[in-house]
Amino acid sequence: MRLLTTLLAVAASALFADSPPAGFTPLFNGKDLAGWHGYNPHSVAKLTGEKKDAMLQKMRDEFPQHWSIKDGELFNPGTGAYATTDKEYGDIELVLEYNMAPLGDSGVYLRACPQVQIWDPANPKEVKNGAQLGSGALWNNSKGAAGKDPLVLADKAPGEWNTMRILMVGSRVSVWLNGKQTVDHAILENYYDRKSAIPAKGPICLQTHGASIRWRNIAVREIGGEEANKILASHGTTGFHSIFNGKDLTDWQGAVSEYEVVDGAIYCKPKKGGNLYHKDDLKDFSVRSEIKIPVGGNNGFCIRYPGKGNTAYVGMCEIQVLDDNYDKVKGKIDPRQVHGSAYGMVAAQRGYQRPIGEWNFEEVTVVGPTIKVELNGYLILDCDLSKVDMATVMAKSAHPGKDNTHGYFGFAGHSDPVGFRNLSVKVIDAK
């Protein structure tokens, strides 16, 4: 975070005075196309098998015909597939400069997903699409979604160099154009599948779209899990208050003897269990926690738990906390058992946990019958339990607490030393 704050204070004109900022790796050497290839995800989105392979190879083969080096800059006349990094990236900070011709239209694809928009705000043909609002927004997001339009108009005139900085953690994206913030921690939607989160990794693509554009001083800094968690925790903090003092289980009830506090975190004791829950009876709320899951680890969040019984059934639900590789370690599981799922009722998306041994950042929001789970910046569950067909739930088990309107928040045990820390809750006003 300190590095990010420092960078934001640097004038755009001085950012690349001699070399990339400390901690950044150049993506373009100013001499050749090393590290890049041609790729347009739209061209292969509906292709499979040999046809897809042939198109991928064609774009690679034709790449040098459309992209070239001029005066140490990466140049494209507005034709061909996009310049795409050979390497795939997860959480990053990306900095670059671009210079686009009048009436131009371009963009930066993150993990091959469209896009941080770049276009000419003075193009009269694009007024219907909002070009007059400026560049630097997530234009391919749904209408009305956060990030769809830029917060400010920050473009320089066509023919001038623009400086862009992109901070991406999970699917959360922030953008600064010429030193002005145009997107603030908005979710980049998956253009190819609106119901799914974007991939955890993917290449960076520089779009070409009908007009010439030049690029230079392209550099990236990969962000580790600890910093990513701090970035996620720094946003949307209003209304949250701590429910764990980091020292002992004051204000916690239930299976207190089955849990312990170690190094500022609550752990279920090995081979112990039971429901540990906080004293506050909650209606609508959001809860934030960092979670560390051991190999094959299993626990869960108690949601609107009444204080007695199995929270997965007598509570509104149990939000599963589980090693993403659990089935490889301990055996096959139902999709509605994966991490983040409303246990046995609604399956969460899988594949967004950090490596074993690292802390994950998770936020669960409960409003009425709806539940959202965001893990490491990815929305992995968005469901309405009132719409669940109980005849289809796992093992056709009864869930008498599914429609609970209030209850306790806590942990569901299951005998594995899963850790929880930095716990905070925000009560959501019924209005």
Image: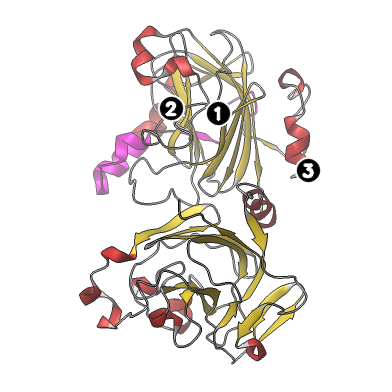
Which tag, 2 or 3, sits closer to the chain's start? 3
Q: Give the Cα distance between marks 1 and 2.
A: 9 Å
The residue to which callout 2 is attached is 63
Q: Where is residue 60 in the image (x, y as percent from the top left)?
A: 41, 33
Mark 1 to mark 3: distance in Å?
A: 33 Å
Q: Is residue 16 above or below residue 397?
A: above
Compared with 254, 190 (above or below) is above
Cα separation, mark 2 vs mark 3, equals 39 Å
Q: Which of the image's four quarters has the N terminus?
A: top right
Circle 3 sits in a helix, a strand or a loop, which is it? Answer: helix
1 and 2 marks in contact (CB < 8 Å): yes
| Residue occupied by mark 1 | 33
> What is the span of residues highlighted in magenta in the rendered image?
28-56
* First in residue order: circle 1 vs circle 2: 1
User: Can you identify the residue that label 3 sits on?
Assistant: 2
Q: Residue furthest left?
A: 391
State the residue in front, 336 or 214: 336
Q: Which residue is drawn at 63% across and 89% down?
A: 258
Q: Quadrant of residue 14?
A: top right
Residue 296 appears in the figure: no
Q: Hey, which quadrant is residue 253 in on the image?
A: bottom right
Type of amino acid at the residue the image marks with label 1: Leu
Q: Vertical placement of 318 versus 90: above or below? A: below
Residue type at mark 3? Answer: Arg
